[in-house]
Image: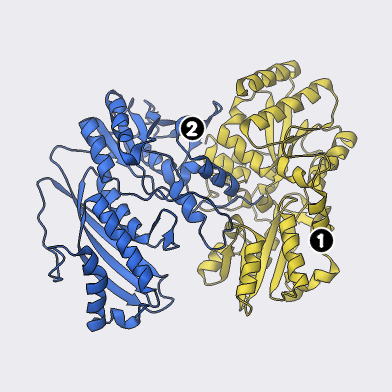
Chain colours: A yellow, B blue
Amino acid sequence: MVPDLLKLIAERAERLAPRTIRFMEVCGTHTMAMFRSGIRAMLPPNVKLLSGPGCPVCVTPMGTVDAALEIVRRPGVALATFGDMVRVPGSRSSLERARAEGADVRVVYSPLDALQFAKAEPRRLVVFFGIGFETTTPAVAATGAYARDRGLSNLLFLVANKVIPPAMEAIVAGGEVKLDGFLCPGHVSVITGTGIYEPLAAKYRTPCVVTGFEAADILEGVAMLLLQVVEGAPRVEIQYRRWVHPEGNAKARERVAEVFRPCDAAWRGLGTIPMSGLEFRPELRGHDAVEALGVEVPPELENPGCSCGEVLRGLIEPPECPLFATRCTPATPVGPCMVSTEGSCAAFYRYGER
Amino acid sequence: MDRILLAHGGGGSLTKQLIRDMVVARFGNPALAPLSDSALVELPAGRVAFTTDSYVVKPLRFRGGDIGRLAVCGTVNDLAMAGARPLYLSMGLIIEEGLALDDLAAILDSAKAAADEAGVTVVCGDTKVVERGAADGLFINTSGIGVVPEGRNVAMERAAPGDAVLVSGPIGDHGVAILSERQGLSFETPVASDVAPLAGLVAAVLDAGGEAVHALRDPTRGGLGMVVCEVAEACRHDIELDEAKIPVRPEVRGACDLLGLDPVYAANEGKVVVVCAEAVASSVLTAMRAHPLGRSAARIGRVLDGAKGRVTLRTAIGGRRVVDPPYGEQLPRIC
């Protein structure tokens, strides 16, 4: 199957040569899967894959990390978050360093774990630092709803959850990088369905293929995108048929909508994108850590010299950043793209030729 | 008396009772029996291999093993990887006040069983009790002594171009088993730790391959990727691994996919990586497969001419990627 797909890709790319075709893989899981299987090097020279903004750790602004640090330094607070977030540098420290200094930082795999902490330790204020996209948000919503319904007042949330389509649109609308298509995220689309990509194909004439995460899925997704380019007929197609249905998971979306409403949100590297973030609805405000604790979330703030923003916009590849593999390594990360297992800098560092 | 009290570490009669009932009752042997300041042992001819390791695993008991078995196997395996026959162990226990005596008994039973399995004797030890909060249940340190027979020279530097790289079985079991039991990790997997003493398997490898067995490593923390990188760096030759040939249980692969981990970097406690001359590779592989701990042994790569000391992996779909040493704990995927 893989050799057949590679042949198909080569034939279609040949028909487009010498034009260079640039596709963006939106999802960090795609980036990682491609490096692990060595796909980038197997593609024809005129087919380039760019990493997009779909690594939730990477797009979380430094100011939000600073807010988490301010929260966890308060007495009686335990902050629970996903592992990668612990190592992301804020402007002066990281949660990892704060933990070493005595702060109660706990790594969890699900917001439900934070719920368990809050129930087991009623005198502690447990703050769940939530990041993630459409795939992760329903679990945060369900946890928030539980806290609201049971009056679990010692469980708060630092919500940095985001939605993907506005960021994709911001990238094509910005025009900084000429894209010939998107490999759309398979897991996100399980929840959202595929309607969210229609404007990209219709208004911006950008081909979209919702793609799975096995090597053969990704190759098939690339082959399908190439065909759309050859035919000059941008549309939304599903490669990941075994999981994704056009209508998505309406129930999960309802759970999210009961708890969250859209708001403007800052993305690292992309700036503030209208209606790209989520905030609690008024009846859950009591569980919003920023509001309840009166924390300042500093606006967009970047680490000088760090090019994560350009990497996230697809403008440069990680090795083009002057800090890459010199000052910034997985052991001493300067930017989040070097921390997250799904970040493209970490993927280039770990699996790429240096 | 059902829990460890601070007084158990006080050096008085309660300490004596603990050592008599818990330690001597299980490990009793002529070298340990006098309970004097030092154990006196005889060593056969050869170079002495001496190693130490501390065990702080959490949780203390996990699917497939516990800290007692781990503390014996880990040190036995470090000796075996030097080509030594493991002979004697010391065992130092640092116990947190409040540990259930039943738990301690079960852990020491399991350590004793592992020592018997490995053919080693625990000849000396120490017991300390620290106040609640100063340790996490139980920490164990073991040191081990073994002997490398005359003429045997197993060392990473000896890996040479053309050598075959073998592994004794599926990788990543221990890492996934532990991860699945950590507090705050809400997934369950049937994967059990592979923790096992490798001295017998290594003896079979050395019998079959003799001097043509160049290097032995047990891929513990950092996994297969880590030790293969270390061999490449030490021998200053490139090594190529073949992903399709590396045995990984489907449930380990599934758990790794779920957590965003790479099985190549997941921990093992009962596997050995063998680098040997191509001429003996088949017979070494046959010998490994004849041993209960090496049934699914596989040839997974080879040492190349290249002198950069780099490790590459031919991926299952025919791509190629660099394998670098990992840089710390593997972190979960979050979307």
Looking at the image, is B84 positioned above or below residue A118?
above
- For label 2, the residue is B243
Label 1's element?
Answer: strand
Within 10 Å of the Cα at label 2, are there few (<14), some (14-19), or many (20+) other Cα atoms? many
Image side of residue A164 versus residue B199, left or right: right
- The spot of residue A287 in percent (x, y) is 75, 71
- The spot of residue A263 in percent (x, y) is 84, 58
Image side of residue B35 versus residue A136, left or right: left
Residue plotted at (84% across, 65% down): A281
B166 vs B191, nearest the viewer: B191
- The CA distance from mark 2 to mark 1 is 44 Å
A217 vs A96, nearest the viewer: A217
Image side of residue B238 versus residue A79, left or right: left
Residue type at mark 1? Answer: Phe
- The residue sitting at the right extreme is A203
Residue plotted at (64% across, 52% down): B334
- Quarter of the view holding residue A162: bottom right
- The spot of residue A163 in percent (x, y) is 78, 51
Q: Which chain carries label 2?
A: B
Residue type at mark 2? Answer: Glu
Label 2's element?
Answer: helix
Which numbered marker is on residue A260? 1
- Quarter of the view holding residue B233: top left
A40 vs A239, nearest the viewer: A239
Which numbered marker is on residue A297? none
Residue B52 visible, this angle:
no
Within 10 Å of the Cα at label 1, are there few (<14), some (14-19), or many (20+) other Cα atoms? many
Q: Dividing the image into 4 quarters, which one contains the N terminus of chain B?
A: bottom left
- The spot of residue A262 in percent (x, y) is 84, 57
Looking at the image, is A157 positioned above or below residue B63?
below
